[in-house]
Amino acid sequence: MKKIVAVSFLVIVSIVLVGYNIEELKREKKQDIAFRVEVQDALNAPYLGPKKNILIVPGHDNIDVGAQYLEITEAVLTCELAKAIIEQFNHDARFTVYITRDCSTGEYTKAFKEYFEKESDAINAFIIEKRADTKRKLLTGNIVENIAVEHTKANTRTTKILYGINKWANEEKIDLILHLHYNSDPRYDNNEKGRHSGFSIYVPEKQLINSEKSYYIGKKIHSLFMSAFPTSSLKIERGGFIEAQSLIALGSNNSLTVPSVLIEYAYIYEPQARTKEDIIEKAIYTHLGIVKAFFE
Ligand SMILES: [Zn+2]
């Protein structure tokens, strides 16, 4: 009799426990679904706050194609990534996204082409003024030279395009310029792989007038990227976060009053870097990093 009572007690306890577990699981699942709906609703809801304006600059163009590996050029790869990033922002009413190149042809968009033409003289004057101002400040000791990583100097045509983009972004009060690049080691043969791998994020050096906000946004993206991708194995890019003083894209010579972040997403010859999956994943993380920077 005692035995039967004991066994019955155990059975009842087990049934209650199993029942409790199922209920618990159901509740968790419900919460999970509710959470997802909530998130979707947030993205679908009309956004009434001020929109953030993002300018995406897919690095290089049809003339200066950037890094190369086999038949792949950096200019094409950055455009593929730009398309995937825009796809992410298209579902997010909190942003208005601009792009410098038409990624179906690789050419600059009509609006940018017209701006470069119409503002040609003004861009030249802008370059002279900004360079002279920095020269003065260097001479008087108002700023000190701080070159962390040497980069290939842009040629005259590219220099003018990059300063033109900066001038436009200042006038339009863009909230963030995002420059997309793929890194490479200097090699004699573009069919050869280089030695290094990983991503790195460049922000304006702290003496530049747009450094503070850029640093904050760059750090947010960087910490998110750190959780998913390996950082650059190149010694001077260790940690994958670098402040740079001489990159026009980041506002060298104080040519930018708005934030700018430049990402080297991977080294161009890394096999995964050229896959659709990697491009989409990097696009998702880029969007999320920017959301965190502006809204969390
Ligand atoms: Zn590049």
Image (cartoon, rainbow, N blue to C red):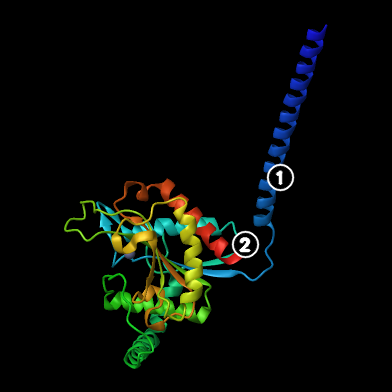
Left or right: where 191 falls relative to 132? left
For the residues labelled 2 and 1, the Cα–Cα distance comes to 21 Å
Kindly state the secondary structure of the residue where label 2 is placed: loop
Q: Quadrant of the C terminus?
A: bottom right
**Where does residue 260 sit, x and y in percent of width and height?**
45, 72
Q: Name the outermost residue toward the left.
A: 188
Q: Is residue 27 visible?
A: yes
Task: Please report the residue visible at 37 percent of the width from the left and 86 percent of the height from the top.
Answer: 143
Q: Quadrant of residue 200?
A: bottom left
Pick the front one: 241 or 75: 241
**Where does residue 80 sit, x and y in percent of width and height?**
41, 56
Q: Is residue 264 visible?
A: no
| Displayed-image quarter of ligand 1 | bottom left
Pick the front one: 234 or 275: 234
Task: Please report the residue visible at 79 percent of the width from the left and 19 percent of the height from the top.
Answer: 12
Three-letter amino acid code of the residue under disc 2: Ala
Answer yes or no: disc 1 within 8 Å of ligand 1. Answer: no
**What residue is shown with label 1?**
34
Task: Please report the residue visible at 58 percent of the width from the left and 69 percent of the height from the top.
Answer: 52
**Where does residue 214 sit, x and y in percent of width and height?**
48, 72
**Where does residue 224 sit, x and y in percent of width and height?**
49, 56
Pick the front one: 75 or 50: 50
Q: Name the outermost residue toward the front.
A: 2
**What residue is shown with label 2?**
93
Answer yes or no: disc 2 within 8 Å of ligand 1. Answer: no
Q: Quadrant of the N terminus?
A: top right
Mark 2 burial class by Cα count in 10 Å: few <14, some 14-19, many 20+:
some
